[in-house]
């Protein structure tokens, strides 16, 4: 439970009276014990109440004032679900007005000319106590553990601040705790809860100084919506130090992401970006604070744009397929064996966009299917076209994405393509990246078994790029192993890498799985690979990925070789 005396800051009192003498008098009485702010009329009073709504303890309100009188203020506050928790004590000389004010929601009254000082202090103190007690008990909108708002109430509240006070420069701050689940697992839940409570207290103390609101969004994530701060690093340090003071024998590391205020950006968007920034601080030992900047903004806008324009891009034929040949190097000269289809996006304004920039985006939001459908269909069509035109079949491999593992329609879509184009299952090969195996091993094995049963051949792409182990190879039902480029890159300089390649090739041979080396760029690499027993090669040495028309010259050359030797490769 929240303990109200954990929060050590003076209560804030707003004194509203059009007469200066009354303001001075009340100020003099209250200033010893409270922080006092003032307003001269009803309009100014409402403004201040809105501005300080989350830390205002009580309002002392004169009833008869120019511009907007006290009754109007009472009514406005009473009808506002975000303000009506703030207690109001009316200042009045008339009995009838007293009654009316109480009926309109005033908590108490102080009569003019003013009562004895002690009476005023006692009344103000009692009302604050009462209202805080009430807040603690009936706090459905609060998070029990930290006393901060819960996320729904917080966002409603933030939206209102944004709506009604658009000129307030409110930054979004997201803070969380690195490896919080591990901390809980190691030290117990009580320990974890205590850290959250300490942070909750310190956040509330901070808010009391700055004006703002905060919530425990969930678990160990805190959202703070506060007036612009000059120095977030020191705020971060303040929270971290507080935790360090209390937690002596464990290493608890906080992370913070900040999205600075921009006009006309609503809180939900600000907090999304603050969270992205906070995530960027993850596992980053250089810094535990990331402030969302223009570069990140640009990248995020670009991502958003690409996502929005994908469909249109397909319709307007901005995508095309390029083909990179794979050669069988056990022959001399090497022989064309197949091709890999790779996608290219030629954007009318942004120019050529690399697949590494857009594939992950579309994997993230499910749109990858649109890309896949396009390129698979195009590849299948191309195989049939070449067979028709040249009388030989050039198998083409397409890339499956890691999220395709979960697509229950995948198999039928692929089978449909093979049937519709009258090609063989083994003509359309499927490349699946190694990291997909490590992420969803079991699902993937099931899927691959089904695809192979249908007749497809599977190539494991990027082998050795991640956390694969050699014994994984025997568990995986694959047809071809595609070694990652990084092995090839160092093969000329590193004896170890060369030995590694030999080892992989040996094991693959033992498993009767051919090996393809990717990223072969020069003659020397080719010779070493050949010597290591690697049968197939793909890379700039032979050709970069090229459009279908250009690829046809490799087919023509291959046809010539076949005529000369009359032994099909
Ligand atoms: P990947 O499947 O490993 O494709 C090989 C990448 O290496 C291609 O980059 C290719 O252009 C490049 N490359 C080929 N030979 C060489 C070489 O000798 N040296 C060097 N330095 N690079 C070489 P690209 O086309 O930019 O594709 C990057 C990645 O994007 C691909 O890696 C693949 O993971 C993904 N991708 C490309 N097209 C598709 C697609 O249609 N569907 C899916 N799901 N992913 C795709
Ligand atoms: Ca590939
Ligand atoms: Ca690859």
Image: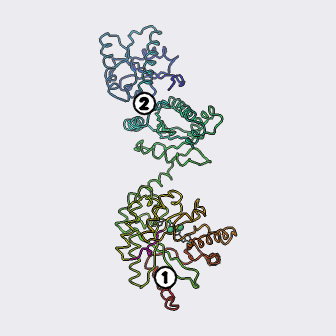
Q: Residue furthest top?
A: 116
Residue 465, image x, y percentages = 58, 63
Q: Residue furthest bottom?
A: 564
Q: Please tell me whether residue 353 belongs to the stretch shown in magenta.
A: no
User: Local crowd at mark 1 within 10 Å, few (<14), some, or many (≥20)?
Assistant: some
Q: Mark 2 points at which residue?
A: 51
Q: Which residue is drawn at 40% across and 73% down?
A: 380
Residue 484, image x, y percentages = 57, 67
Indicate left or right for 81 with 192 as reference: left
Q: Which SS class for mark 1?
A: helix
Q: Earlier in the sequence, mark 2 or mark 1?
A: 2
Whether residue 165 is situated above or below residue 38 in the rendered picture: below
Q: Nearer the viewer, residue 16 or 248?
A: 248
Q: Nearer the viewer, residue 384 or 344?
A: 384
User: Which region of the structure is painted magenta?
Assistant: 423-430
Q: Distance between the residues labelled 2 and 1?
A: 73 Å
- Closer to viewer: mark 2 or mark 1: 1
Q: Which SS class for mark 2?
A: helix
Q: Please tell me whether residue 428 belongs to the stretch shown in magenta.
A: yes
Whether residue 326 is situated above or below residue 567 in the rendered picture: above
User: Local crowd at mark 2 within 10 Å, few (<14), some, or many (≥20)?
Assistant: some
Q: Name the residue under label 1.
A: 554
Pointers 2 and 1 in contact (CB under 8 A)?
no
Q: Which quadrant of the view contains residue 158?
A: top left
Q: Which quadrant of the view contains residue 87?
A: top left
Residue 519, image x, y percentages = 57, 71
Whether residue 265 is situated above or below residue 540 in the rendered picture: above
Q: Which residue is drawn at 55% across and 63% down?
A: 475
């Amino acid at each position: 439970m929240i303990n109200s005396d954990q929060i050590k800051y003076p209560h804030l009192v707003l004194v509203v009276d059009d007469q200066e003498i009354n303001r001075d008098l009340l100020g003099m009485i209250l200033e010893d014990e409270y922080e006092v702010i003032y307003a001269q009329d009803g309009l100014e009073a409402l403004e201040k109440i809105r501005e300080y709504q989350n830390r205002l303890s009580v309002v002392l309100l004169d009833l008869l004032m120019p511009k907007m009188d006290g009754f109007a203020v009472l009514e406005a506050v009473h009808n506002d679900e975000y303000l009506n928790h703030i207690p109001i004590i009316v200042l009045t000389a008339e009995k009838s007005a007293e009654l009316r004010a109480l009926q309109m929601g005033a908590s108490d009254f102080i009569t003019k000319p003013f009562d004895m000082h002690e009476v005023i202090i006692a009344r103000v103190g009692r009302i604050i106590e009462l209202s805080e007690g009430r807040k603690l008990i009936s706090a459905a909108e609060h998070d029990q553990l930290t006393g901060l708002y819960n996320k729904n109430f917080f966002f409603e509240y933030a939206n209102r601040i944004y709506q009604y006070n658009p000129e307030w420069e409110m930054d979004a701050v997201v803070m969380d705790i690195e490896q919080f689940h591990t901390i809980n697992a190691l030290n117990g839940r009580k320990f974890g809860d205590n850290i959250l409570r300490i942070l909750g207290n310190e956040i509330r103390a901070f808010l009391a100084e700055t004006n703002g609101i905060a919530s425990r969004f969930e678990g160990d994530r805190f959202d703070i919506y506060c007036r612009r701060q000059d120095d977030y690093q020191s705020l971060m340090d303040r929270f971290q130090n507080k935790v360090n003071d209390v937690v002596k024998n464990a290493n608890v590391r906080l992370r913070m992401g900040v999205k600075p205020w921009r006009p006309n950006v609503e809180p939900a968007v600000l907090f999304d970006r603050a969270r992205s920034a906070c995530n960027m601080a993850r596992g980053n030992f250089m810094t535990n604070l990331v402030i969302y900047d223009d570069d990140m903004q640009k990248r995020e806008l670009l991502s958003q744009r690409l996502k929005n324009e994908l469909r249109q891009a397909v319709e307007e034929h901005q995508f095309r397929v390029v083909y990179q040949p794979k050669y069988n190097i056990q022959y001399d000269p090497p022989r064309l064996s197949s091709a890999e289809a790779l996608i290219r996006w030629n954007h009318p304004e942004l120019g050529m966009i690399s697949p590494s920039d857009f594939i992950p985006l579309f994997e993230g939001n499910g749109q990858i299917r649109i890309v896949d459908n396009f390129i698979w269909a195009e590849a299948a069509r191309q195989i049939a076209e070449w067979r028709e035109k040249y009388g030989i079949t050039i198998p083409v491999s397409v890339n499956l994405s890691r999220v395709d593992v979960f697509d229950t329609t995948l198999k039928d879509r692929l089978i449909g393509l093979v049937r519709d184009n009258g090609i063989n299952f083994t003509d359309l090969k499927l490349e699946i990246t190694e990291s997909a195996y490590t992420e969803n091993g079991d699902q993937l094995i099931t899927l691959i078994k089904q695809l192979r049963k249908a007749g497809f051949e599977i190539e494991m792409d990027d082998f050795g790029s991640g956390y694969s182990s050699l014994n994984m190879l025997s568990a995986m039902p694959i047809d071809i192993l595609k070694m990652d480029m990084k092995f090839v890159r160092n093969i000329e300089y590193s004896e170890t890498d060369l030995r590694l390649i030999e080892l992989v090739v040996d094991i693959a041979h033992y498993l009767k799985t051919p090996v393809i080396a990717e990223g072969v760029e020069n003659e020397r690499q080719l010779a070493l690979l050949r010597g290591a027993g690697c049968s197939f090669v793909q890379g700039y040495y032979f050709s970069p990925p090229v459009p279908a028309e250009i690829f046809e010259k490799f087919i023509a050359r291959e046809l010539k070789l076949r005529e000369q030797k009359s032994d099909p490769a």
